Image (cartoon, rainbow, N blue to C red):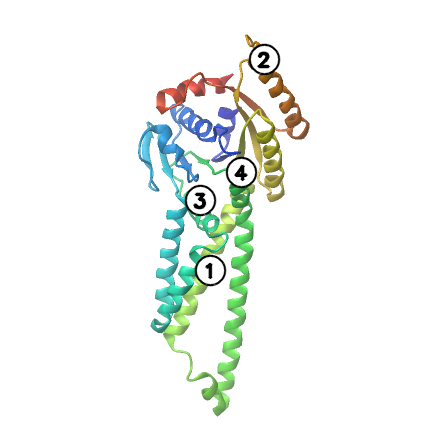
Amino acid sequence: MLLSLASQRSVLFFGGKGGVGKTTVSSATALAMADAGKRVLLVSTDPAHNLGHLFGRKIGPKAVRLAPGLDGMELDPDKTVESHLQEVSSALRRLMPAGMAGEVDKHIELSREAPGMQEAAMLERIAEVVEQHDDYDLVIFDTAPSGHTARLMALPEMMSVWTEGLIKRREKADKFTAVLNTLGKDRSVGNNMLGAEPAAHDEDRESKIRRILNRRKQRFANLREKLLDQNYSGFVIVLAAERLPVLESIELAKQLKRTGVDVAGLVVNKRLPAEGLTGFLAERKAQEEIHLQDLNSQLGHIERQDLTLSAHDVLGVDDLRAFARQFAN
């Protein structure tokens, strides 16, 4: 299921409860597709930096070669926020009067810890990656645990609406200012209220602000369109055959459905072998089947792949290739 799915889509997101093996599954999928001749970019949005640990090397916000045909990058939420705020601050300083520099700094500092700032900054970065992935046949995102990811998937629509609201309010303000300026030309009181006609650099500043807002709106709209296109992207939920991961996966699938994101597949990772179990392990296997019955009752319509628990830790390219052999079953 995984290899077929990865060959049909341009972007795949892997998500689920923490600790179920999302990074291993997404990385093995990416490596298998690269070995099949695809140009693949593997992107981690998880602050735990598991991607670097898995491949045994330092990975940062710029793409690095992990294997032939496979590049990887890690997007650190805190560093992404800092970079995002620096870009916003730089833009505001260019657009606002010099006397408002202090207000700009105050606004940026207050924004740093604002609710949703990490998600908004990360969304901008994801949108950039999706926009600029022409060098790759497939982009795979290894996402943070379920709750964070569900909010992230819903954010493009909310950010588009919010930015559209900013643009409309800006247009209304411009029209109101134009009316007042017209009145100011006809009546002496106008100059007392408004001063002289707007300087050319003020009009240029307003034009730049509108361009920035429109560009931001278009970026979110493009990302939203691609997330909703089932021929272009999909979401794979990774879970373990345990009660809490199953319940969380069912809820995540419902949240993604509400946002219009296609849940393209389920991966039940770390399954016990089908045969040769006795005592404690046999009881655990029976528990797995009970939990998977609950999963099937809610999400039985979604294609599923089960992966057997490895006898040892999966670390490095060779282990990932060995792990990926299960995908063909």
Circle 2 is placed at which residue position? 282
Q: Which mark is residue 308?
A: none
Of badges 2 and 4, the one in the foreground is 2
Q: CA distance from mark 1 to mark 4?
A: 30 Å
Q: Amino acid at mark 3?
A: Ile
Circle 4 is placed at which residue position? 146
Please state which of residues 163 and 286 is positioned toward the viewer in this rendering: 286
Circle 1 is placed at which residue position? 213
Residue at x-position 39% and y-position 40%: 134
Occupied quadrant, residue 29: top left
Residue at x-position 49% and y-position 55%: 217
3 and 2 marks in contact (CB < 8 Å): no
- Outermost residue on the bottom side: it is 188
Of badges 3 and 4, the one in the foreground is 4
- Outermost residue on the top side: it is 276
- Badge 3 or badge 4: first in the primary sequence: 3
Q: Amino acid at mark 4?
A: Ser
Callout 1: 10 Å neighbours few (<14), some, many (20+)?
some
